[in-house]
């Protein structure tokens, strides 16, 4: 039996972004967990990141047209 390994990443916006009625600020930090060890949480269309921003902040990542270069990514643990 193999252990389920998850990897945490802290996602931090680099600057304030105002687009389509959405506002993203540098204090809107989220932590996402991926089932695979990845250095780029945007590899799958940022699904985990989109879900976390909507759940915590009510921020619509897609509506704001966010891109990978809007964020810094820090590996946890």
Image: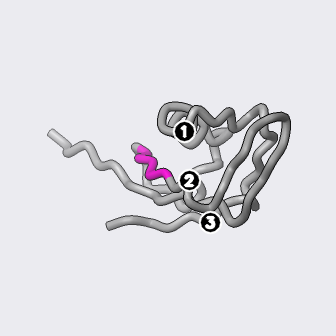
Q: Residue furthest right?
A: 20
Describe the element under mark 3 as helix, strand or loop.
Answer: strand
Q: Give the range drawn in magenta.
A: 30-34
Residue at 64 percent across and 47 percent down: it is 43
**SS of the residue under disc 1:** helix
3 or 2: mark nearer the eye: 2
Residue 44 coordinates in the image, percent (x, y): 63, 40
Q: Earlier in the sequence, mark 3 or mark 2?
A: 2
Q: Say which quarter of the image contains residue 51.
A: top right
Q: Tags 3 and 2 in contact by the CB under 8 Å rule?
A: no
The image position of residue 62, as x and y in percent, is 74, 34
| Res 30 label | none
User: Which of the 4 quarters of the picture holds residue 75?
Assistant: bottom left
| Residue at disc 2, secondary structure | loop
Of label 3 and label 1, which has the lower sequence position?
A: 1
Alpha carbon separation for disc pair 2 and 1: 8 Å
Q: Tally the numbered discs.
A: 3
Q: Badge 3 is on which residue?
A: 72
Which quarter of the rendering shows the N terminus?
A: top left
Labels 2 and 1 touching (C-beta < 8 A):
yes
Tell whether position 32 is magenta: yes
């Amino acid at each position: 039996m193999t252990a389920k390994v998850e990897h945490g990443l802290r996602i931090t916006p680099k600057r304030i972004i105002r687009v389509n009625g959405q506002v993203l600020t540098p204090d809107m930090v989220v932590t996402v967990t991926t089932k695979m060890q990845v250095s780029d949480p945007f590899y799958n269309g940022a699904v985990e990141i989109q879900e976390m921003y909507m759940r915590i902040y009510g921020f619509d990542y897609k509506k704001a047209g966010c891109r990978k270069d809007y964020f810094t990514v820090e590996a946890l643990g």
